[in-house]
Amino acid sequence: MKLHYSISGVGEPILLIHGAYVNSDIWHYQQVYFKKHFKVINVDLRGHGQTPASELPEYSVGTFGEDLVHLMDELHLKKTTIFGLSLGAMVAQYMAANYPSRVNGIVLVGATASLRLNLLERVVTTFIFPKWVAMKLFSRLETREFMKISFALTWFMLGNKWLGNNQTREKIRGAIIQVPREELKKIYNAIHSFRKQNLDSGDYPVLLINGENDSPVIHRHTRYLNKKIGARASQLEIKTAGHACNHDQPLIFNQLVFDWLVDNNLAQVNYSYEKTKETAISLGVG
């Protein structure tokens, strides 16, 4: 699969993986910021953005993950730090679990540990909204209809704050409308079929980061991952931000992640700083 990607800057590599139905442009602010010190690879997953659809009847998180491993081979990247948002966080977990020797660290934004983490989620995915219902529904919807229904349901269940600020919502709308109709159910299948990954397979550090207004379910998954990973994990929350907190509050997000990269020796830069509680409060960190 030939993926569309861009490379900016020089230095230690960072691989950016976007969420479902959006594209690499959701990382615009990170690409501009981190290219000052890193080689930033910003990629469109298959069926998203400028990467074409494929003939596969279904996608899985592993499908996307293997595409990116092949891209790393093509670019002669032995190891990289991975940033993953939402679906991208699932893909990052897959890559870290299955190719730990190729991962320097992972930044999981709005991460889900599994679509069947507890009893309630198993009931929902098995009986209330099983895969066959989703596939039948998505196969009948045009992309514009899918976008309207998705925004309406998200607003009803979680409110506009979860969707982020006006600029982020428009960014998401503009990206979804580009997704080919036949890709809607394939992408959803990857999300629906995602299960827990073994993140004990390596010694890479993990940053878990959420917006304050992210879904309570996502916050619970983040707490689960933080506890499960243990000492290698760090957890941060950004105030007044939604699911795509990297786009809602880019200045805060970029500074926090940069600090974490430096703390974990993942950045080859001369950077001295002193972090204090007052600084954290001013940045909007929870």
Image (cartoon, grey):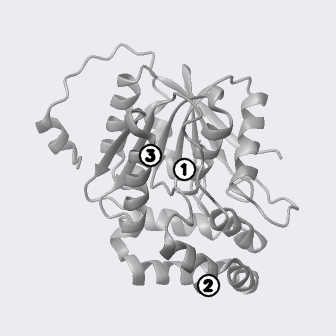
Q: Residues within 10 Å of mark 2 (few under 14, many from 20)?
A: few
211 or 102: which is nearer to us?
Answer: 102
Q: Are marks 2 and 1 in contact (CB under 8 Å)?
A: no
x and y, in percent, of residue 185 in the image: 72, 73
Which quadrant of the figure has residue 264? Answer: top left
Q: Nearer the viewer, residue 41 or 116?
A: 116
Numbered mark located on residue 89 in the image: 1
Label 3: which residue? 228
**Considering only vertical position in the picture, is 254 above or below 18?**
above
Relative placement, left or right, of 253 versus 29 is: left
Residue type highlighted by circle 1: Ala
Sequence-first tag of 2 and 3: 2
| Mark 2 secondary-structure assignment | helix
Q: Is residue 72 above or below residue 284?
A: above
Q: Residue at x 60, y 48 (%)?
A: 197
Q: Residue at x 49, y 67 (%)?
A: 118
Is residue 178 in view?
no
Residue 111 in the image: state x and y as whole percent. Answer: 48, 54
Crowding at label 1, few (<14), some or many (≥20) Cα neighbours within 10 Å?
Answer: many
Mark 3 or 1, nearer chain start:
1
N-term mark: 2 or 1: 1
Image disc number at residue 127: 2
Label 1 secondary element: helix
